[in-house]
Image (cartoon, helix red, strand yellow):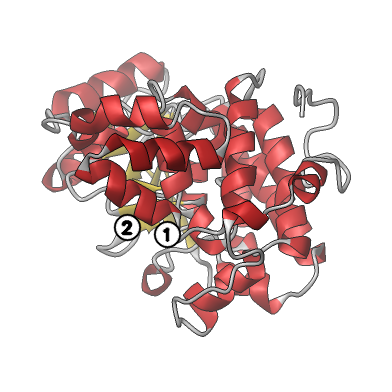
Amino acid sequence: MSDVIVERVGALGRLRLDRPKALNALTHGMVLEIDAALNQFSADPGLAAVLLTGEGERGLCAGGDLRSLYDNPGTVFAEAFWRDEYRLDARIAAYEKPFVAVMDGITMGGGVGLAGHAAHRVVTERSRVAMPETGIGYLPDVGGTWLLPRAPGELGTYLGLTGAAVGAADAIPCGFADAMVPTRALPDLIDALSALRPNAGHAGVRDVIARLARDPGPAPLAAHRAVIDRCFAFDSVDEILSALAADGADFAAATRKTLLTKAPSSLVLTLRLLRLGRAAPNLEACLEREFHASLAVLAEGDFREGIRAAVIDKDKTPRWNPASLDAVDPAPIARWLETRAEPVFPGSRTGPA
């Protein structure tokens, strides 16, 4: 049975992630199926656009299939999976037909990789968008270190380090999405897209979305923007924690408490990647750097332990090594930024490490 439903509806090529019991968690096989479907859609002159959605009521995609990574020790399986996944993310970003992604419900990690780089990104009142990887000893990959640094001020640093989930009102100004369409209007969105002329282009798709879009309301993070910009402006996690401790606001105290539950090494690595991503020349450069860092943390970091605690044993009590920030050795972190395998994008310029 396929985990991706591929179909043509009028002038619309549809991709429907179909693992609802697993919150449509992305497997390597699904990556390959989506890529093959994009080949098919690309060759069809009658298609006006491509639409990505998730089956079930809970979300588009909760992320990559962590169990498959845990069940395949070493890095051989992960290297093949991530190489194809990251190439797919980059392909979606540059896809020749208008690519529309609907982030209804939970959209995290690998789901953001599929949807966050699309040309037209739709959220709903049910959307919960996040890059929660520091909580499992990992890093915000799938181009997260490209998207997050481009959020206003230090919002991306805050989201990348804390893993906080945001709704539509924050996802749009943070650069994860472009418009909010109510869930009840999604059937109308599909119908209107399928009725487009094949040559409608991006303008035609934008017009459809604009007709159905609604104001998502005030952004909750806006109330904390001054604290976030001030406290997350530093280039070391220790300084960020100190700034939060000195701030005195309830939000700062709660944020500091959250950070202290994350994998210390992942926090240090993630902050470094976010700062490098800010100066990156393109998405591919960030994906390339994330690829090699991902292989490193799987082999040497806390990633397997994070998966164990969250997915395998589900005890929610990961044993981070080291257990505290003051014990993190910067030398291994620096090595995690080095090339570990054949490049994902030959000739990609990642910039300074």
- The residue sitting at 37% across, 25% down in the picture is 230
Q: Is residue 113 above or below residue 193?
A: below
Q: Residue furthest top?
A: 203
- The residue sitting at 20% across, 50% down in the picture is 126
- The residue sitting at 50% across, 27% down in the picture is 149
Contact between marks 1 and 2 (CB within 8 A): the answer is yes
- Rendered image quadrant of residue 167: top left
**Mark 2 — residue?**
59
- Rendered image quadrant of residue 208: top left
Indicate the secondary structure of the residue bearing disc 1.
loop
- The residue sitting at 39% across, 18% down in the picture is 202
Q: Relative to residue 292, is residue 262 drawn left or right?
A: left
x and y percentages locating residue 13 in the rendered image: 44, 41
x and y percentages locating residue 312 in the rendered image: 54, 81
Camera-nearest residue between 104 and 206 = 104
Q: Is residue 138 above or below residue 323?
A: above
Camera-nearest residue between 47 and 109 = 109
**Mark 1 — residue?**
62
Camera-nearest residue between 201 and 280 = 280
Indicate the secondary structure of the residue bearing disc 2.
strand
Q: Is residue 165 visible?
A: no
Position of the C terminus by quadrant: top right
Q: Is residue 110 visible?
A: yes
